[in-house]
Structure formats: C-alpha cells, structure tokens
Amino acid sequence: MTSDQQRIDSFRQAAGRFASGVTVVTTALDGHLYGITATSFVSLSLNPLLVTVSINSHSPILDEIRASGVFAINVLGRHQQDVSACFARRGRGRSKERFDEVETHSEATGAPVVTGALSWFDCTVHTMLSGGDHIILVGEVVSAGGGTGQPLLYWSGEYRELSTAEEAEADIGRIADSLSIQLHLHGMRAEQLLEAQHAVEPAAAALAARAASDDQVAQLRDLVEESEKHVHDASRYNPLSLEFHARLGLLSGNPAIAASVGALNRPRESVYAVHTNAERATRAVEAHRRILQAIEDRDEDAARRLMTEHLGVVAQGMPC
C-alpha cells in the first residue's frame, strides 16, 4: 500500500468517527425531481441565513441545481433510513414529477421537501465553491420548518441511535432551532427579544437551581470559565455567552421552558453580536458567575433575581 493510500485510508477512518446527521438534497427542473443523500450539512450564517452542504463534483444533481437556482436540504429522522438508502443508490435520484418511493411536497422555491423530514431548509443558490473533489453548495434559506422525532445519525459506517436522555435533549434542540429560524426570518426587534427573555429566563434560572445535577452545574461552570478567557474576542466570546443562556433552559428540566429559551438563540445572536465589547463581556461574565453561584447554592429566589437584574443591565445597553 502506498503512503498516499495509507493517508487516504487514515483520513476516512478519522472522518468516519465524526457522528453526523443524514440529509437529502433535492431540486426540481422542467418537471423532473432530483435528490441525493449527503451528510456534510452545516449551518453557516445568520445574516444572511446561509447553509452549506458538500456534494461530489461528479454528481449530476449539481448541473440541475445550477440550472434551477434552488434546492432543499431535508434532515432525516430516525424512521427514514429507507429514504436515505433510496437517494444513496445510483440512478434513484431522478424522477418525472414525483419520486416513486418517497413522498415529497414543495414549499417556497418548488424544490421537493421530503414529507416527514425532521427538518428542512428551502434555499436559493447563493454560491457554489470548489473544494477539491467536492462542490460546496451554499444556499440562502427562504423558508424552513420541521416535525417531531429523533434524528437519523451516521457514525463509523453505520446508522446509530441516541440514548433516551440524548433523544429528549435533541428533540428540544430541534424544536427550538426550528422556531429560532422562524423568529429570525420574521425579524424580531430588540425590545421584543428582551421582553421574551424577561418572561422565560429568570424562571429557567430558578428551576435550574432546583433541578440541575452536580455534573450539569460543573459543566455550566466550565462554560463560564471558558467564556471569561475570551472577553476580548467577540467572535469566540459570543457563542459561549449565548450557550450559557441556552444551557440554563435545558437545566431547568422543563421542556417548554428549555425550548422557549433555545428558540431565542438566533435572535439573541443577531441583536447582541454587534454590540459586544470587552467591557460588556466582562460585566456579563460576572453576572453569569453570580447566577451560577446561586444555582450551586440551590437558591431559586436568588437565581431568579440575579437573572432578572442581568437582563435589566443588558437592556440598558441596547438600542430599543
């Protein structure tokens, strides 16, 4: 075996250890539908809303996407292994008017959306970039949505399932992410975001003080300490700070509150990112530490009060 082949094999083995969701990329052109299975889906940008997926440069679907200017990314649920297999087979991804084995419908662009998909992103083509033997397809999301259920995962050459606890968290995350996208597309104003935060996040902090396990609190502390290291780098600090708030929702133990807090992720990032500086970041970390301490002390009233105070300080620095 050559050194190049060894390097390729090692690369494949290493890449296969990264667990990924499974998607089907679809488009429509001149009365025909096209689809292909892909696992390289990534959410890229919030402003504008961009997603990416990589497709082998020899795949014929790329020509159809170039011509149509639209495509949909369908995130498959655990019950849709047959859908994944269907679009992974050579020659099965092209059909006249409808796919024989898979039910679809159209949303905004006319690209087929797989019925029953865990979530979907209906896109216009933003950019198509060369990436070695693949084309990186960048889409601007014009509509998005989803249903309920657990994700279809692919790891080390096989389909996998989440544990019960992971399933519950993934369900909440999926619901929150779908609503978060819709809120962002709708255009949530700063004052509306602050009102929503005041309504749910103090309750989340109080419930976290009651329900969070010692391991969960330790993980929250690690998150705060990591964010403190990056107060002078907004690009690294902001995601950690936003994760603190989202994590409190999950630690509340209440799925409705967790989903509500998580749904504010994209509006939070959109509104707060441009206003972050080292001084504000330092103050926020100090507030997060106080909230964390109240949670560690199992002091629900203090956790609620400190979160309310923190949001009040945030509101003072925001142009509403």
Image (cartoon, helix red, strand yellow):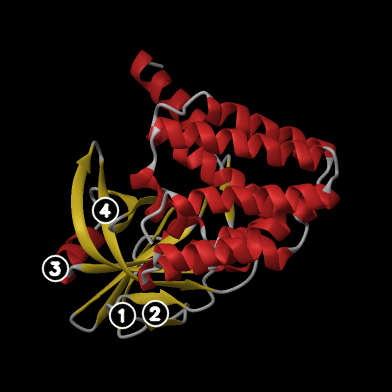
The label number, if any, that marks residue 67 in the structure image: 3
Q: Secondary structure at mark 2?
A: loop
Mark 1 secondary-structure assignment: loop
Local packing at callout 4 (Cα closer than 10 Å; few below 14, some 14-19, many 20+) is many
Quadrant occupied by the N terminus: top left
Mark 1 vs 2, N-terminal side: 2
The residue located at (55%, 66%) in the rendering is 196
User: In the image shown, does 294 or 161 lie closer to the viewer?
Assistant: 294
Q: Earlier in the sequence, mark 1 or mark 4?
A: 1
Mark 2 or mark 3: which is in front? 3
Q: Please tell me which residue lies in front, 108 or 159.
A: 108
Secondary structure of residue under mark 3:
helix
Q: Which residue is painted at 64% across and 68% down in the image?
A: 149
Compared with 27, 224 (above or below) is above
Q: Which mark is residue 99?
A: 2
- Calculate the distance from the C-alpha at mark 4 to the C-alpha at mark 3: 14 Å
Image quarter hosting the C terminus: bottom left
Left or right of 209? Residue 161 is left
Q: Position of residue 202 (x, y in %)?
A: 68, 57
Calculate the distance from the C-alpha at mark 2 to the C-alpha at mark 3: 20 Å
Q: Are marks 1 and 4 in contact (CB under 8 Å)?
A: no
Q: Earlier in the sequence, mark 1 or mark 3?
A: 3
